[in-house]
């Protein structure tokens, strides 16, 4: 398990943007003072599914829907040869506590602080 470091995207001009290769279970740190963009890239020949799951995510109350179970995490499918990006604030219910990315060994990841 590795901690994926975030990249400061608030820089002027071009900047280095390290690419991490995910293992079976990696962690990211949520920075509530920043918008964060997670980019997942699949360089393999098959589809991979990454699950983003915070250790404190259980249920959330959604207006007009009621109680929604988020304990299993948010599954994000990344098809072969493609990239998928997600603004983490849009899935914040899944990003409470220590946030793990599981099930996506070999995916490439970049976490940008915007």
Image (cartoon, rainbow, N blue to C red):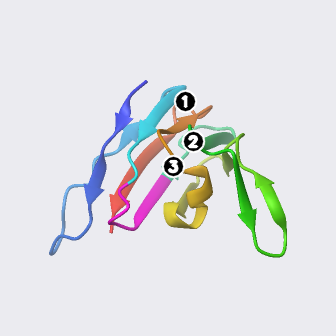
* Disc 1 target residue: 105
Specify the quadrant that holds the C terminus.
bottom left
Image mark for residue 41: 3
Q: CA distance from mark 2 to mark 3?
A: 27 Å
Quick one: label 2 or label 1, which is nearer the N terminus? 2
Secondary structure type for disc 2: loop
Q: Is residue 21 magenta?
A: no
In-front residue for pair 41/51: 51
Give the residue displayed 22% in from the left and 70% down from the top: 10
Q: Which of label 2 and label 3 is nearer to you?
A: 2
Q: Is residue 110 above or below residue 34?
A: above
Secondary structure at badge 1 equals loop
Frontmost residue, 92 versus 17: 92
User: Does residue 41 appear in this view?
Assistant: yes
**Percent from the top left, x then y, of residue 90?**
57, 67
Mark 2, Cα crowd under 10 Å, few <14 / some 14-19 / many 20+, is: some
Is residue 36 within the magenta segment?
A: yes
Q: Quadrant of the N terminus?
A: top left
Residue that label 2 marks: 56
């Amino acid at each position: 398990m590795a901690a994926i470091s975030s990249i400061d995207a608030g820089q002027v001009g071009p900047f280095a943007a390290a690419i991490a290769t995910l293992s079976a279970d990696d962690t990211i740190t949520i920075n509530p003072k920043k918008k964060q963009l997670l980019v997942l890239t699949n360089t393999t020949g098959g589809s991979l599914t990454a699950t983003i799951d915070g250790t404190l995510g259980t249920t959330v109350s959604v207006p007009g829907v009621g109680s929604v179970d988020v304990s299993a995490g948010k599954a994000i499918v990344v098809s072969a040869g493609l990239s998928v990006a997600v603004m983490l604030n849009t899935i914040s219910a899944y990003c409470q506590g220590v946030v793990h990315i599981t099930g996506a060994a070999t995916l490439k990841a970049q976490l940008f602080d915007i």
